Image (spheres, rainbow, N blue to C red):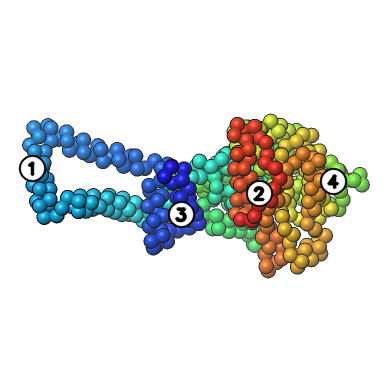
Amino acid sequence: MSIGLFRRAVRNLSRGGGNIPSQGGTHSSVRRLFQWLSPGIFVKRWLFTIYVGVLMTLLGVAIWLKLTPIFWLFQLVDKIIEFAARVIPHYLSGPMVLGCGLFLIFWGHSRSLGEISKVLRPDGGQTVLDMLWNNRRLNRGPKIVAIGGGTGLSTLLRGLKLYSANLTAIVTVADDGGSSGRLRRDFGVLPPGDIRNCIAALADEEKLLTELFQYRFEAGDGLMGHSFGNLFLTAMSEITGDLERAVVASSKVLAIRGRVLPATLTDVSLWATLADGRTIEGESNIGGSDGQIVEIGCSPANPPALPAAIAAIKEADYIIMGPGSLYTSVISNLLVPEIAEAIAARQVPRIYVCNIMTQPGETTGYTVADHIESIDLACGQRLFDAVLVQKNPPSAGCLQNYAEENSYPVLLDRDDVKQLGRSIFAVNVMEEDPTTRFLRHNPRRLAKALIHFYRRSQEYSPNRNLKVAPSRNIKSA
């Protein structure tokens, strides 16, 4: 069996394990055995080195003592073997001794790793072997840069962290509403809201950290309406000196998987010109404007990009834009010219995740091609080669619920999209809340589809000169 086939067998046995605590039973034992035997966790070689060292140490002591202990040991072993050969035939005694030896080796490893796991994870979570295996797998994942903001980006990161630890989220800092807006006005800090959501999404203890960071104070002068996460990042900004250092420090404290970077450290404010001639200022006002946006920009114009964000794009194997509000979450990042230019210069898989539904007041009546043209127009250049769209329409009840808010499915106008030179990647990535009848991207399905696209792109582009695979639909995850 080749190493590739062996690794595939281990991957299949481990599928579904992820961050789930190990379960008992034969299947779990077999899975751990395959994980242990699989190459790549870089533990067995060092254990073998220890065993060789122990044998050499014993041999050195024996030589130092003029071989006397070795001589008597060989004499004793010889007598035992001679006696065993007379009682039990060699074709039975040999396999029995070999089996006992292998059993003791694996039993000793299993128990030692089990005891270490009890110390490191007393809650009965992942074993040391599971942690080693998952960390190695994730650290080998592609270098992914995800660009956006709002809940769309955090949803995307929640799924991507299952496939790679080499994640960089580049987040907009144009938010001026709610708690972020108040902190921005009162303390002069960059809005932490979208960054807070991304940090929570990348954390290992995601559920608990999300609840903590999203907790909003309901009483107290000055505290009411603020989320704990926003206050935490604001305090860290004051301590460390700026938002970039605050995010880095917070990421270390919270042990997140990947990095979160603001697009710029400049205090920017969005503005938009509507078709009727009006100019709307402020991210929160643009999202609620009742008119077609014909131009969008920021003040001050052409803000400098965060150097770490540019470095991440230049090193990226894969660049993803969206999902999220077209103008206020996606395009707002691309108004930083250095970011747009860095993306345009990369010859790696680049894909835009289109929204499932139109957003009232921002993309009313928009088709998929309209989303693409808006990005091209705002940036003045082509930044991605493919677009991911939802394949099947929502349920009738869900459509009716959205229609009451003047929101409708984003129409896939295939011919127009192809005229724009983009490949179409249609897949079922949405999930519907049965209670509220609202839609969202399913993190796991979306991430699986995007990784599938990346791997197919690599097959078509072995030298990283991207030639995106022909448009095709795939089954939902």
- The reply to whether discs 1 and 3 touch (Cβ–Cβ < 8 Å) is no
Label total for image: 4
**Given the image, on which type of amino acid does mark 4 rest?**
Ile
**Given the image, on which type of amino acid does mark 3 rest?**
Leu
**Tag in front: 1 or 4:** 1
Q: How busy is the neighbourhood of tag 4: few (under 14 within 10 Å), some, or many (20 plus)? A: many
The secondary structure type at the circle numbered 3 is helix
Which label's residue is closer to the chain start, 2 or 3? 3
Which label's residue is closer to the chain start, 1 or 4? 1
Residue beneath label 1, please? 75
Residue beneath label 2, please? 153
- The reply to whether discs 4 and 2 touch (Cβ–Cβ < 8 Å) is no
**Given the image, on which type of amino acid does mark 1 rest?**
Gln
Residue beneath label 3, please? 13
- The answer to which of 290 and 386 lies nearer the viewer is 386
Residue beneath label 4, please? 293
**Given the image, on which type of amino acid does mark 2 rest?**
Leu
- The answer to which of 247 and 76 lies nearer the viewer is 76
Residue at the spot 74% in from the left edge and 65% down from the top edge:
395
Left or right: where 221 falls relative to 113: right
Residue at the spot 78% in from the left edge and 51% down from the top edge:
412
The spot of residue 449 in percent (x, y) is 63, 50
Residue at the spot 64% in from the left edge and 32% down from the top edge:
465
